[in-house]
Image: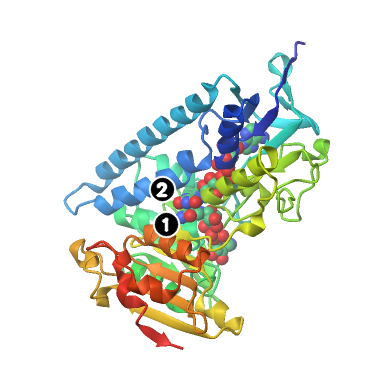
Amino acid sequence: MTITALTADVLVVGFGKGGKTAAHVLADAGKRVVLIERSENMYGGTCPNIGCVPTKMLVHYSGAKRLADDAQEYFARSTAGVRALTAAFRAGNFEALDGKDTATVLTGTASFVDPHTVAVGEGDDRITVTAPTILVNTGSEPVLPAIPGLAASPHLVTSTELTKTSNLPERLVVLGGGYQGLEFAAIYRHFGTHVTVLEAADRLLPREDEDIAEAVAEILRGDGVTIVTGAKVTEVRDNGATSTVVYEKDGEPQSVEASAVLPATGRRAVTAGLRLDAAGVRTTPGGAIEVDEYLRTSQPDIYALGDVNGGEQFTYISLDDARIVLDQLLGRGKRTTTDRRAVPHTLFVTPPLATVGLTETQARAQGRNIKVAREKVADIIAMPRAYTVEETRGVMKFIVDADTDLILGAALLSIDAQEVINTVALAMRHNITATELRDAIYTHPSTTEAFNEVFDKVVSA
Ligand SMILES: Cc1cc2nc3c(=O)[nH]c(=O)nc-3n(C[C@H](O)[C@H](O)[C@H](O)COP(=O)(O)OP(=O)(O)OC[C@H]3O[C@@H](n4cnc5c(N)ncnc54)[C@H](O)[C@@H]3O)c2cc1C
Ligand SMILES: NC(=O)c1ccc[n+]([C@@H]2O[C@H](COP(=O)([O-])OP(=O)(O)OC[C@H]3O[C@@H](n4cnc5c(N)ncnc54)[C@H](O)[C@@H]3O)[C@@H](O)[C@H]2O)c1
């Protein structure tokens, strides 16, 4: 048996955002980098292949569908567009890294041999890579809830399949009303599918204020999505062309027919098969790789970046993880996860919900002296943009410290919210006050100019 043994300065396992970003910077700094990715369909990782990029392109396509469009044909064209874009991004990701003199991309599933060595492949194809520093960036995968009949259901679909199929399902049942569940519910409803969301909790988006979660639910319901909260799914029964999803609501048995069932009940770290025990890398009880604030694992020369380290599951967090690790490897070693402040999030329903900082509920629970500024988008006179693009649904809400005038949090359910929230987050990080945001000059017509008005609309103090 021939085993190829490679050496590198830095080995990266997984082609996610953090790993590839670090790989580029390290290779450009003259380090010899090897990156191992298990699938040729995943160069670039989850986000450009099966996550953010395809779903946001589907948000765009589904929103542009006209009544006259044939639903099936339009959907097939849309997912073909997604496949073309993701293929281009995938190829670009591979070439940009593998094309560097100091970097090599290997394709195969990696597993640890010892704290400095990883093996890929079997038999004659087996390659080992040894490096003094290893970055693990293997991402996360969906959790399949233990519901009788679900795993074996011929109508079970994954989020990946839903971004690639050419067949628009007639009836989609989504299990879970979190980020993934609500985005797919909105997308598929706009394409013309009958959509039901079954959420186990008493209400949608339990981390958000009740008025904001209700405003989101109202918009989705208005678009025709059926939302059932407090739903305990007990069984999925196959009926040939469809499945029956059985659930309990208020102790009463109910059911809904599905031609596709999407579990969107959370994602867990991908560590199975990595043989972390061979490297002496510890995991948390939830299965993520245990890290400190510098993203060092229990083995000081092995770092874990992105979803696999159990942090927040967002692409920009994985990117920030790369900054922390690069500061360890090339910089002053000071940057940590505790430096993060005012990290924004966007749920890409239509219009999007973007949030940052504290909710009103959290601020009150902390005993803060707060003012709440809140206004419906349709009522914001200073923001005609909503009317010019005919999307006046939603609400803007800001939580302001009544003593310091600093912004503590915001929830923007509005057109352009995914952009505007970044300005709010920046203001929070740099202690720009609500009055300063209110009195600033903004372009017109824009969504940001709503600040001129909403910061004056204090509804409670
Ligand atoms: C449908 C969906 C929509 C999303 N939308 C957004 C969004 O709009 N905005 C946002 O910020 N986030 C979004 N997310 C979350 C975001 O995609 C993830 O948080 C992010 O991609 C995680 O990146 P990562 O760096 O942890 O690794 P990943 O990008 O997940 O990459 C890990 C890579 O490691 C590979 N791998 C795994 N095991 C091995 C092994 N043993 N050997 C070799 N390779 C291996 C995998 O094949 C994969 O390519 C979405 C997620 C999903 C599923
Ligand atoms: N726009 C974005 O940034 C974006 C989009 C999609 C996903 N993501 C990331 O991916 C992660 C995973 O997304 P997700 O939506 O799968 O997880 P999530 O944790 O956001 O939501 C899961 C939901 O499923 C519910 N649930 C759990 N078990 C259930 C059951 N048996 N029946 C019914 N409901 C059940 C939970 O109460 C929760 O509301 C997100 O947390 C986010 O970090 C981000």
* Res. 34 visible in picture: yes
- Helix, strand, or loop for circle 1? helix
Circle 2 Cα neighbour tier, 10 Å, few/some/many (<14 / 14–19 / ≥20): many
Specify the quadrant of the image occupied by residue 391: bottom left
Is 426 displayed left or right of 387 in the figure?
right
- Relative height, residue 279 to residue 418 (above, below): above
Determine contact: label 2, label 1, CB under 8 Å.
yes
Rendering quadrant holding ligand 1 = top right
- Relative height, residue 441 to residue 134 (above, below): below
Label 2 lies in ligand 1 vicinity (Cβ under 8 Å)? yes
| Amino acid type, label 2 | Thr
For the view shown, which residue lies furthest in the left direction? 68
Tally of numbered discs = 2
Q: Earlier in the sequence, mark 2 or mark 1?
A: 2
* Res. 174 visible in picture: no
Is 139 displayed left or right of 225 in the figure?
right
Write down the residue under mark 2: 55
Which residue appears at 60% of the width and 82% of the height? 365
The quarter in which the N terminus is drawn is top right
Which residue appears at 36% of the width and 46% of the height? 57
Write down the residue under mark 1: 183
Using the image as rendered, state which of residue 129 and residue 8 is in the foreground.
8
Distance (Cα) linking label 2 and label 1: 8 Å
Circle 1 Cα neighbour tier, 10 Å, few/some/many (<14 / 14–19 / ≥20): many
- Relative height, residue 439 to residue 9 (above, below): below
Label 1 lies in ligand 2 vicinity (Cβ under 8 Å)? yes
**Picture coordinates of residue 421, whole percent (x, y):** 42, 62
Using the image as rendered, state which of residue 89 and residue 330 is in the foreground.
330
Using the image as rendered, state which of residue 162 and residue 456 is in the foreground.
456
**Picture coordinates of residue 371, whole percent (x, y):** 46, 84
